[in-house]
Amino acid sequence: MYARIAEFENRDMSRVDELIEMVRERARSGRDLIDAKRLLMLIDRDGGTALGITFFESEEAIAEAEPTFEQMGDQISEGLRGRRKSVEIYEILFEDIADGAKAARVSTLEGSPDGIDEGIRFIKEQVIPAAGDISGWRGIVAIADRKSGRTKTITLWDSAESLRASEARADELRRQAADALGETITGIDRYEVAISEVAAALRS
């Protein structure tokens, strides 16, 4: 599985709920991105930024969907969707997402690609069981760019309050993960989970 992550900035947050409903309606209609497996839409209302994360079975499926993404960008005004800052493709190393996620923490780490598999094994065996005991935990997605060595972990929480309450423990677990991966933590961002749906649910 692979994830396409589009980052947007300078969004008019007074219209963000309108955008969320538009994206959800288009996804449920089934007319766009018919090969998509899951959609995550993460919003930072204070910062005016957002991530659109779409899961696909392969990199080829993402490439085939790219014209549709461009068409959708043309159909939704920049004032509503924001300016697209970047698009990145990552391999999904594992995902475990429960229902009810309302907040997300996205941690970015960078280092040598050589340590990715061993680091991910450590995260699965050590970090996730510990994180799962934290109140409000709703799951995790771990993704990597094996060429650059960049990895991201997206942890999901049942509320912004649970996310904030988990900060100290999350810092400790993040350092353990970085050590296991042989990587450096380069970014930590926090978002509201606006949409978190599998494709079948979106189209039902």
Image: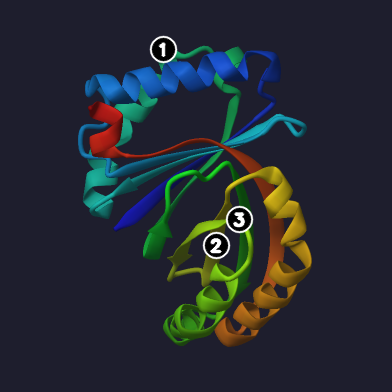
Query: Mark 1 or mark 3, which is nearer to you?
Result: 3
Q: Which sits in the foreground, 95 or 147?
A: 95
Disc 3 marks a residue whose amino acid type is Gly
Query: Mark 3 or mark 2, which is nearer to you?
Result: 3
Residue at left 21%, top 39%?
Answer: 35
Few, some or many residues within 10 Å of mark 3 (<14, 14–19, 20+): many
Residue at left 66%, top 23%?
Answer: 11
Query: Mark 1 or mark 2, which is nearer to you?
Result: 2
Disc 1 marks a residue whose amino acid type is Gln
Locate residue 110, reporting x and y percent: 61, 71
Give the quarter of the figure containing the N terminus.
bottom left
- Tell me, for residue 152, which label it has, or none: 2
User: Which tag, 3 or 2, sits closer to the chain's start?
Assistant: 3
- Provide the residue designation for mark 3: 136
Q: Quadrant of residue 70?
A: top left
Q: CA separation, marks 1 and 3?
A: 37 Å
| SS class, disc 1 | helix
Give the quarter of the figure containing the C terminus.
top left
| SS class, disc 3 | loop
- Provide the residue designation for mark 1: 75
Q: Quadrant of residue 97?
A: bottom left
Question: In the picture provided, is 41 more to the left or to the right than 161?
Answer: left
Q: CA separation, marks 1 and 2?
A: 30 Å
User: Which tag, 1 or 3, sits closer to the chain's start?
Assistant: 1
Query: Residue 73: in sight, yes or no?
Result: no
Residue at left 40%, top 23%?
Answer: 24
Q: Which sits in the foreground, 198 or 67?
A: 198
Locate residue 182, reporting x and y percent: 60, 85
